[in-house]
Amino acid sequence: DTAVSQTPKYLVTQMGNDKSIKCEQNLGHDTMYWYKQDSKKFLKIMFSYNNKELIINETVPNRFSPKSPDKAHLNLHINSLELGDSAVYFCASSQGRNGAPQHFGDGTRLSIL
Amino acid sequence: GESVGLHLPTLSVQEGDNSIINCAYSNSASDYFIWYKQESGKGPQFIIDIRSNMDKRQGQRVTVLLNKTVKHLSLQIAATQPGDSAVYFCAETYNFNKFYFGSGTKLNVKP
């Protein structure tokens, strides 16, 4: 069983569109994260939720909106996609707050045309 | 071989040699550190961690060294194998409140 699963794995879309990425974890963790990884492999934390409560909200355009319907799910909705949004987006989860060892999904590669 | 992991340098080592990957962390108050391994097309994977009250911790073929005086963390991989080829990240945490990932080092193992 996959511990942290993201869908879709690949997402190719046009500028201006709205898209969502879904994440689910079956580890029973209470904290989930979204990261953006650019072409130079730099990992940037975007959001973190602990028990459905937003605890990290880094400087991210408000076109990005996370939603956590329950502890096991953290989705990311992106409005009005821009070329600079092209990246790999990773979901992760951990037991305990920020900085505890995280389990990552395999990423969603977003390409904006 | 050794590298400093502040941008994305590549460390190339021969299979069977030992590898040393370095990381300079930013916050002198950081009290917990983790090394992650990211293989191509995959998400980062936890390798080993160390708390600030320790200088050294060993795992299977991996050792993490912490030098708080100079804010330096290193990951040593013994008898490097082709399966060790990946990008390695260090992460630091202060009081499980804030945490930061380093910018990664690519390890290339030559057969």
Image (cartoon, grey):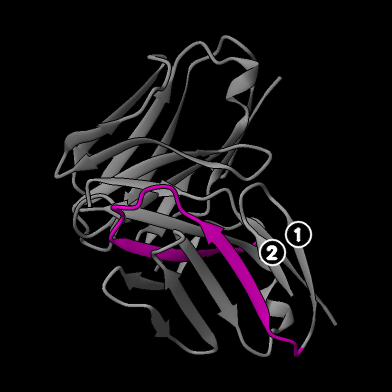
| Disc number for residue B82 | none
Which labelled disc corresponds to residue B10? 1
Distance, label 1 to label 2, CA atoms, is 8 Å
Q: Residues within 10 Å of mark 1 (few under 14, many from 20)?
A: some
The stretch drawn in magenta includes residue B103: no
Amino acid type at circle 2 is: Ser
Q: What is the three-letter code of the residue carrying label 1?
A: Thr
Q: Residue at x 71, y 84 (%)?
A: B81
Mark 1 residue element = strand
Is residue A2 at least partly visible in the picture?
Answer: no
Label whose residue precedes the other's in the sequence (1 or 2): 2
Across and down, in percent, residue A14 comes to 65, 16
Q: Which class describes the residues within 10 Å of circle 2: few (<14), some (14-19), or many (20+)?
A: some
| Side of B67 where B24 appears, left or right | right
Residue A39 position by quadrant: top right
In this rendered view, identify the residue nearer to me: A53 or B29. Answer: B29
Residue A33 pos. (x, y %): 34, 43
The residues colored magenta run B16-39
Q: Is residue B26 above or below residue A63?
A: below
Tell me the chain of label 1: B
| Nearer the camera: disc 1 or disc 2 | 2
* Above or below: residue A78 compared with residue A97: above
Identify the residue position indicated by label 2 in the image.
Answer: B3
Q: Position of residue B25 (x, y in %)?
A: 46, 53
Front in this rendered view, residue A40 or A36: A40
Relative side of A95 to A93, left or right? left
The picture quadrant where one finds residue B17 is bottom right
| Residue extending farthest front | B69
